[in-house]
Image (spheres, rainbow, N blue to C red):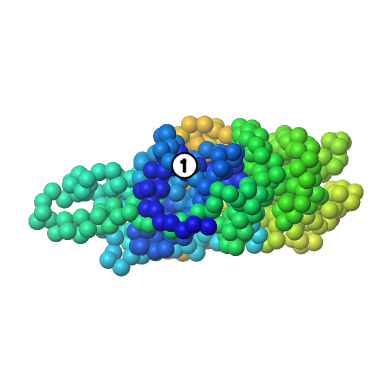
Amino acid sequence: MAKAERSVQDLVNQIKRREIVLPEMQRRYVWKSSQVRDLVDSLYRGYPSGAILLWETPGDVQLQSFAVEQDGVPIGSQQLLLDGQQRLTSLTALLTGEDLVVRNRRRPIKILFNLDHPDVLESHDNSEQINLEADDLEEEEVEEIDDEDTEEDSSNLTFIVGQLKFEKMPNWVSVTDVFQKDNTEILRDAGVTSFDDPRFKKYNQRINRVKEIPSYVYRLDVLDRSLSYEEVTEIFVRVNSKGTTLRGSDLALAQITAKWPGCLADFQLFEKSCNRENFNFDVGVNLRALVSLTTDQCKFNNVHQIPRTSLEDKWPVTKKAMEFSTNFLKSNCGVVTSALLSSNNIALVLAYIADRWNYSIDPSEADALRRYLLLSNAKGRYTRASSESVLDQDLRTVRDGGRVPELLASLVAQVGRLSVEAGDFVNRKSTSPIFRTAFMAFEQSGAKDWKNSLTISKLLSGSSYSLQVHHIFPRARLEGQYDKRDINDVANFAFISSATNNWIRARRPSEYVPEFMAERGKSIFEDQCIPTDPELLEIDAYPLFLAKRRELMAVRLNKFLQTVETID
């Protein structure tokens, strides 16, 4: 294995000229905006950023596309990128200004640099980025209903993910602009027009420091071209399994493509088919379904032992089962998008059930199955530690002939009770399973936007009508009197359109609720379990408002979930 060094700029140029390409074994681009931000921040500070692993390809390897355009013609030999795709894709987009859509974000990412950052660099607080799952099911992460970005205290930060309000501030500049514009233009846009300006020296030095990022040198490990694809796959798996770089599904994909060349194209085609139905089941999710239907267990540990013929035979079966699963979720459960699922494993266990029951489900059992799936969703059955083991438990139950009563018994053993209580909403986030289920209950009751009267739905189109999570008591009215956790309590959240949200802004509920009730009636609030008693809409009564709404939401969810304490 050869050693080498190469600058960020040289690596970016090689990617654009197709001298660095992606093998089929690689995963897709999956980074979140915060990871791109933190990479730039690390390079700005001069922190180590790992090594890059390449392979001198013999030229007969199945490839896939980068998430950025490669529009050049190679002038040298091609090398396969085995480790470093996420970093180099992010840096290529930032250096060239190409749009890059990151995970869980609709708009292309933009990273902003704070010319006025403190001399002692502040770090981002990552305390909220804890993965609640102990295993590698990173694909369980789901899109928030409110897609607005928040950087609540950014004045002391060096880099942030771009937001319009900061882009308009002269001290915040686009990192891409720093790479592509000269210092004079950047300084002028920041309001510095003279060498005598006290900010000139500081800003100029900081701009130059960002401009040094393309000169950062990565260490390269280059595998010899004489190695076989199988050997390189084994190296790829071993290197990435040592840390948290890849998910189990990524390592499984590498092993599957090694024995079944060309399969990735069909996997990606089916992923697009799922996405068109508003179910964001990526290749990793569908691979887990394939493994489950092939081996009667969901773990990827023994993928290398599955014969290619078994995988090829079970792939059409898997697609059929997953298609049934999404149709059942939509038509029978009211789950019209995977954004409402607390875990994609709900779709996987349903696919397994459909296949093992030969797609023969009578009406009464379909109703029971619907109830089990919605209860599992609300209770977060697969969002707790060891979710793989929980999924395997359900697969074994079905494999051994168990039906819905046995599945419900396992759920009761896990969560203790099926009913929902007011206390279940305390200290829950907008992404919590119980709040997603509350949305479905509100939607079923016909809840409408308070201004345009459109029924709330995750499938609404157009920026003005897209659904947002709205603070019933605006944050600006509560800050200073209540702590952040209470302000962001889910009992203070309602679902309305972005246009209505912008119209309300920071008005007190004691002001806007009576206005809406006079125009639209009381039901627009009752459909979302929002108390309208005047005395509960005052700022001082906020704790009483939360307590009352939790009670109303618990009653609504118990009705929606048909909750009883027995499992017969």
Q: Which residue, as the protein is rendered here, is positioned at the far bottom?
A: 120
At label 1, the amino acid type is Ser
Q: Which element type, helix, strand or loop, lies under badge 1?
A: loop
Regarding residue 502, the answer to whether it shows in the image is no
Regarding residue 202, the answer to whether it shows in the image is yes
Disc 1: which residue: 77
- Location of residue 528 in the rendering, given as x and y in whole percent from the top left corner: 59, 44
At horizontal 62% and vertical 59% (from top left) the residue drawn is 238
The answer to whether 218 is drawn above or below residue 67 in the figure is: below
Side of 98 relative to 189 (left or right): right
Taking depth in this image into account, of 371 and 121 the one nearest to the observer is 121
- Location of residue 172 in the rendering, given as x and y in whole percent from the top left corner: 29, 51
- Location of residue 201 in the rendering, given as x and y in whole percent from the top left corner: 17, 58
Side of 197 relative to 97 (left or right): left
The answer to whether 88 is drawn above or below residue 313 in the figure is: below
Q: How many marks?
A: 1
Taking depth in this image into account, of 78 and 251 the one nearest to the observer is 78
Q: Residues within 10 Å of mark 1 (few under 14, many from 20)?
A: few
At horizontal 55% and vertical 48% (from top left) the residue drawn is 225
Side of 530 relative to 498 (left or right): right
Residue 122, quarter of picture: bottom left
Q: Which residue, as the protein is rendered here, is positioned at the far front?
A: 226
Taking depth in this image into account, of 269 and 157 the one nearest to the observer is 269
At horizontal 45% and vertical 46% (from top left) the residue drawn is 89
- Location of residue 125 in the rendering, given as x and y in whole percent from the top left corner: 44, 63
At horizontal 58% and vertical 62% (from top left) the residue drawn is 243
Side of 535 relative to 386 (left or right): left
